[in-house]
Amino acid sequence: MTTLWGPLGWMALHSASINYPDNPSQVEKQICSRFLDLFTETISCNICKSHFLRMLQTYKVIHPEYLNSKQDLFLFTVRAHNTVNRRLDKPTVKSVSEALKTLQQATSLTSPAEYRQKYIEYLKRTWGTDRSANGLFASQKIRELEKINNEYWNHRETSYVQFFYEADVLEYITEAGVKKTSAGFAPLVGGQPKVGFGGGRLKLRR
């Protein structure tokens, strides 16, 4: 189940972060917070759900600014993804620029919006066969998740052609807090060079 949930789930999450505003209103922050809660509650792998919930709770404490901007939310999604990949002994991206490149490549044939829709369809199929109270509860959450996707994210659709400051994406999220790499970046400050990538296909290791 994790082989299906993981790729689609992460692509859905990354694409939502790119659609988030640079300067969100309080209402938009509430919408995104609700989306993240629903995303967590509908994860189809119980172990994955528990781990993601702990990461999200920890990150909120360590980085209360995580909903302050598009880049802040994007950093959460990349750091969380890296944390899981590190635990599973899978490759991690080493920089913001590498994350953007990799996601551009992954969406060269399937758009970010399509990934979100495919993920929602996967959730419907998976939870739709569960007739327990948990399944019924999850199905209600999926409908709300889909409503936010259709009425908010889809209307803000953009691409991974973004311009972000570099930051430490190898900040692993643990229950004790965050574990920074020895070569970690300094806190984000103004005046640092921005990175971003234009059109064209990119060939990177996935």
Image (tube, rainbow, N blue to C red):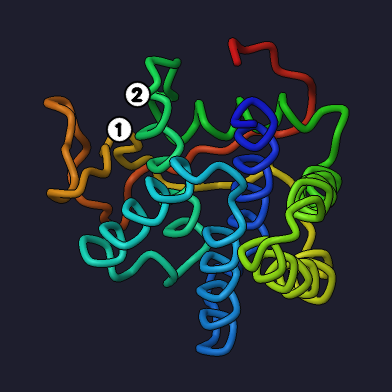
Quadrant in the picture for the C terminus:
top right
For mark 2, what is the residue?
Answer: 86
Which of 157/85 is in front? 85
**Residue 42 x/y as whole percent:** 61, 58
- Indicate whether 191 appears above or below 168: below
Tell me what residue is drawn at x 33 percent, y 51 percent.
55
Q: Is residue 64 left or right of residue 45?
A: left
Displayed quadrant of residue 180: top left
Q: Residues within 10 Å of mark 1 (few under 14, many from 20)?
A: many
Q: Residues within 10 Å of mark 2 (few under 14, many from 20)?
A: some
| Residue type at tag 1 | Leu
Tell me what residue is drawn at x 30 percent, y 65 percent.
60
Tell me what residue is drawn at x 42 percent, y 72 percent.
68
Quadrant in the picture for the N terminus:
top right
- Indicate whether 130 appears above or below 107: below
Q: Which mark is residue 170?
A: 1
Please name which of the two marks, 2 or 1, marks the residue nearer to the observer. Answer: 2
State the separation of the CA atoms marked 2 and 1.
10 Å
| Residue type at tag 2 | Arg
